Amino acid sequence: MQFPSKLMPGAVLGGRYRIEKRVGSGGMSHVYCATDLRLQGKKWAIKETITVPEQYANLEEEAELLIRLNHSRLPHIVDFFPPDPEGYTYLIMDFIEGLTLEQHMIQRSEGMTDAEILRIAEQICEGLAYLHQHDPPVVYRDLKPSNLMVDRLGGIRFIDFGIARQFKEDQPEDTVKLGTVGFAAPEQYGGRQTDARTDLYSLGALLLYLITGGQESEWRQETDQRLKSSSGPARSPELLAMIRKLLQYEPEQRYSSVQELQEAMQTLALKYSDSKRSGSGASELSRTRVIAIMGVSGGVGSTHTAIMLGYSLQRHFKEVCLLELSDKSNAFSRLQSLTGRKDEISGQSAERHFTLQGVRYCRRPSRMEMLELISGEDGLVVLDLGNDRSKEAFEEFMRADISLVIGSGAEWRFQDLVAFCRMSSAYPHSKWIYVVPAVSLEVIHHLRRKLGTSRLLPIPFEDDPFQPSPETVQVLENLCRPILQAQKPGKRFKFKFHRKMWGGRS
């Protein structure tokens, strides 16, 4: 039975938040959309809850927990009103425009494909991984379609932390048994403490719910027959086996961690990607191309070069996407402000995806997002690796069709190029191209002798990388001729330079 609300459209909470409409209700809370009277055009979600005095501590704990959390998949709390004399309390958090995952599923009357379901699962795993790695770990405990939102960019967002709890090693079982019937793990009904594997069970229940169109959330004897007779998309045996493992009764028989599950999903996603490419009839000419850019040190202009390349080659591809892979860079975050859309897209996910002058930008994409982009047709993906030296960064660098190492033309920084070559000597350099912006051919010849390679080239420097000059476009098209002519990676080609572009002597 729902409790009566004290909020009505037009009411103002705390002298700042004007209630616009109710957007949801449950047995323990109401949720409203409110306008911020101090920040023009800003909307917030207000969660109204009523409780008894002995539960006040739980509400304060929930608010403190949310305040400490900071992840793009999780709700960000900005204000908290403690219980009033009648027990009403309010949490102010991001308002996420979109549909609940439940509503999204209903709209997809034809059913979701395996690849779509994997993309949803990967995004959920991003949020769960963050929670489980928190110190102490946080167990969500109520993963279900109505507690997840699909925002306007197609991203998955958690929207309710009413029963999340911190894992306590010395506690044999939970003091409160909470969770939604049908999605709760067996251990949530008592007898033992919930942990990260509890959330993995709920994820399995949710995935089964999605692939059966909302008909099943537990694997019963009838489930196999229902899947065989379903008129929806055919399901791969690997995906079904993954879900069955998640739904094991004993936690020890499930995946041991979110990270283990993510590795299994990436393997399956690669299979879908290969299948999509081979089954689509796409030729070598039409597949998406990848350029990876790595700086020999910080401040050499890897992001500047990535942007310049994207706009120089834009006319050759159906879509160009720039990906910022380094978690230490905030260059794309600053660029997002140039779109002028900060108030139009709610939530932190808006900072990860945006479009600027026809080029797509994505900050720190998940493995699933990268696979989806790279498995497309007629596109160009530019990977900005910054000066990341991780094994993962070098793996992406090696896989690219063109791998560019950016160095500095300043004489006092020549040693950075030498140090990079020594540091990366364990990797094959046969298709790497070293480029140095805004230097003469004399400097290029000097660096070639110093490094012992002829694959070191000059490129122009542009003050405005978003509008490269025709001369710069010509040089970069020449540099990237292998992918523009659809030659296979690794095939030999020759560079053609025009001395008049550089003002130097050969």
Image (tube, grey):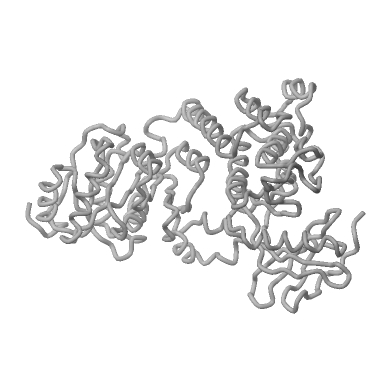
Residue sitting at the far right: 1
| Residue 109 spot, x, y in % from top left | 73, 37
Q: Is residue 314 visible?
A: no
Residue found at x 25% / y 32%: 491
| Residue 332 spot, x, y in % from top left | 44, 59
Residue sitting at the far left: 505
Q: Is residue 262 visible?
A: yes
Residue 177 found in image quarter: top right
Question: How many numbered marks does the figure carry?
Answer: 0
| Residue 214 spot, x, y in % from top left | 77, 36
Observer-nearest residue: 215 or 126? 126
Observer-nearest residue: 385 or 318? 385
Observer-nearest residue: 467 or 387? 387
Residue 481 found in image quarter: top left
Q: Quadrant of the N terminus?
A: bottom right
Q: Is residue 344 above or below residue 217?
A: below
Q: Seen in the image, is 466 located left or right of residue 366? A: left
| Residue 450 spot, x, y in % from top left | 12, 48
Residue found at x 39% / y 47%: 383
Q: Seen in the image, is 272 located left or right of residue 49? A: left
Residue sitting at the far front: 170
Q: Is residue 387 above or below residue 80?
A: above
Q: Seen in the image, is 430 located left or right of residue 155? A: left
